[in-house]
Amino acid sequence: MRMKRTGESAGSPKWNQEARGASKLYSQGPVSIPEMITAKELEALLKIDVKTIYNYVHRGLIPYVKIESNIRFLKSEINEWIEARCHSARVISR
């Protein structure tokens, strides 16, 4: 919920509308935020250099979340991304 700006009273229609929207959101129970990790944490997890991770982000090869100027990765999406790239060994029959 945004804070009141100077010159905007708590009784103004815009303020009340935003307060009602926020109360609806919170009345549905606690908001679940998925687990996010940093590029440095992803580097340790994947054993891939952080520069390579940022290169993947730049090229659109890896799922990420941008929060202002910060890049974060949803752990669940990274797990799905890894699973989609798993290759099983081929069985060669003779």
Image (cartoon, rainbow, N blue to C red):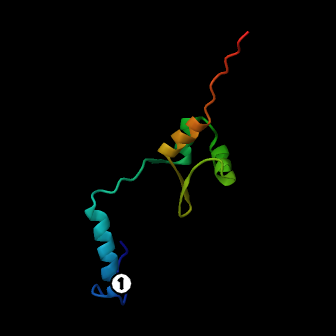
- Residue 46: x and y in percent read 58, 36
Q: Residue furthest right?
A: 94
Inspect this view and state whether residue 75 appears: no
Q: Residue at x 53, y 40 (%)?
A: 80
Q: From the viewer's perspective, is 28 left or right of 57?
A: left
**Amino acid identity at mark 1:** Lys
The picture quadrant where one finds residue 11 is: bottom left
Q: Quadrant of the N terminus?
A: bottom left
Q: Residue at x 42, y 50 (%)?
A: 34
Q: Residue furthest front?
A: 94
- Residue 63: x and y in percent read 58, 49
- Residue 55: x and y in percent read 68, 49
Q: Quadrant of the C terminus?
A: top right
Pointer 1: what residue?
14
- Residue 31: x and y in percent read 33, 57
The picture quadrant where one finds residue 14 is: bottom left
